[in-house]
Amino acid sequence: MIKHHISDKLLMAYCAGTLPEAFNLVVATHISLCDECRARMEGFDAVGGAVLDQRVSPVAMSSDALSATFRKIKAKTAPDGPGYSAAGQAPHTPSAMRDTVLPGPLLAYTGGGLDHVQWRSIGGGVRQAILPTSRHASARLLHIPAGTAVPDHGHRGLELTLVLQGAFVDESDRFARGDIEIADEEMEHTPIAEMGADCICLAATDAPLKFRALLPRLAQPFFRI
Amino acid sequence: MRVANGQDAQAFTKLFEHFAPRVKAFLMKSGADPTTAEECAQDVMATVWHKAAQFDPARASAATWIYTIARNRRIDMLRRDRRPEPEDLPWGPDAEPDQVDALALQQETEKLAQAMNALPEKQRKMIESAYFGDLTHNEIADETGLPLGTIKSRIRLALERLRHSMN
């Protein structure tokens, strides 16, 4: 049972199409696991529908626009149409590809299931894999061994952490598969992976993390976290 | 929507006349020049035709569905950040949309539009700016003031029916 969901403002920004790619990825992955937020998302899409339908003054199309559109339909060249690959759209995930830990939107970024993830150690037993997104925010998978703590850290920007396997606890609550923690600048926390299964999370941030301890801080530019 | 069934050119023409000028205006509000907006509005309507079979009236109105296509076209047009979509729901054999669900959703959509019209000007402008792409997520208010609870419950029911039909 998912307890921690996406905030209204993040969902609205996702539906408006204005989030950085890394955050879009977290939102899409959470919604893949959460029907409650899928329904909320479609509610925010409906707000967009109302804006389109009622809050703009229509601008006349050119006189041959309809026939031009029918020509496009026949040629099947429209974006989103069959045979068209748009630059703005995320990499396509073959529907045959399924993974029990990584939901569909993530598979397109890892190139396959958990076995395909290229982990790198960042110390303390913790491993990460940085995912290829736009530079406006970064996304990475974290692998935290059961019972291990991630160093106490604060945030300069916004950080979203979505649990995909296992669970972690911090000062605020417990987070299990599907739960999302939204951490802003005021929050400092020490997430600890629960005993039992190793914890795998998808984390995204629009600013580099700042660690309390000196060593991880020095290591930051090197590890790009 | 009859376009969804048998790709009816007449139904499409009606849809085009209503929505193409709105999509064009929406794209211009989002920063496109009139020529680009015209071109992209045609693309959006062509996509509406191609994807008509995927339209589910129990979960979205035509305006909502066309909005999502226009939004994706805008992201592409302005070279904004890529936007992964949630995993598709595996379609059940019995996924024919329920007429009662579709009607109820239609009513909720109308109520939502009325609620938006009744919002204080400042709040309504904030929402419009957000959807025209003028606000970052930090600039969007924590409270939208929109009563989204009932439309969400409706969509949730339709999703549950879909999930049920898959099992």
Image: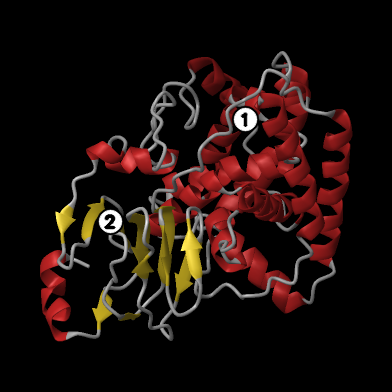
Q: Position of residue B159 (x, y in %)?
A: 70, 39
Chain of the residue displaying label 1 = B
Under mark 1, the amino acid is Val
Which dot, 1 or 2, sits closer to the camera? Answer: 2
Number of other residues with Cα within 10 Å of mark 2, as a class: few under 14, some 14 to 19, many 20 or more: many
Is residue A89 at least partly visible in the picture? no
Separation (CA) of disc 1 from disc 2: 42 Å
* Percent coordinates x, y for residue A168 in the rendering: 41, 65
How many numbered discs sit on the rendered protein? 2
Horizontal side, residue B16 vs residue B68: left or right = right
Return the chain for callout 2: A
**Residue A60 numbered mark, or none:** none
Could you tell me which residue is drawn at 43 percent across and 45 percent down? B76
- The outermost residue toward the front is A196
Rendered residue at 81%/49% (across/down): B109
Quadrant in the rendering for residue B146: bottom right
Helix, strand, or loop for circle 1?
helix
Residue at image location 24% in from the left, 55% down from the top: A130
Q: Which residue is mark 1?
A: B48
Residue located 50% across and 58% down the image: B31
Along the line of sight, the residue nearer the viewer: A24 or B117: A24
Its colouring scheme is secondary structure
Instruction: Read off the residue under disc 2.
Output: A143
- Image quadrant in which the C terminus of chain A is located: bottom left
Name the one closer to the observer, B85 or A76: B85
Could you say which quadrant of the image residue B91 lies in?
A: top right
Name the spot of residue A69 as percent of width and height, x first: 58, 26
Locate residue B161 relative to residue A164 in the image: left or right.
Answer: right
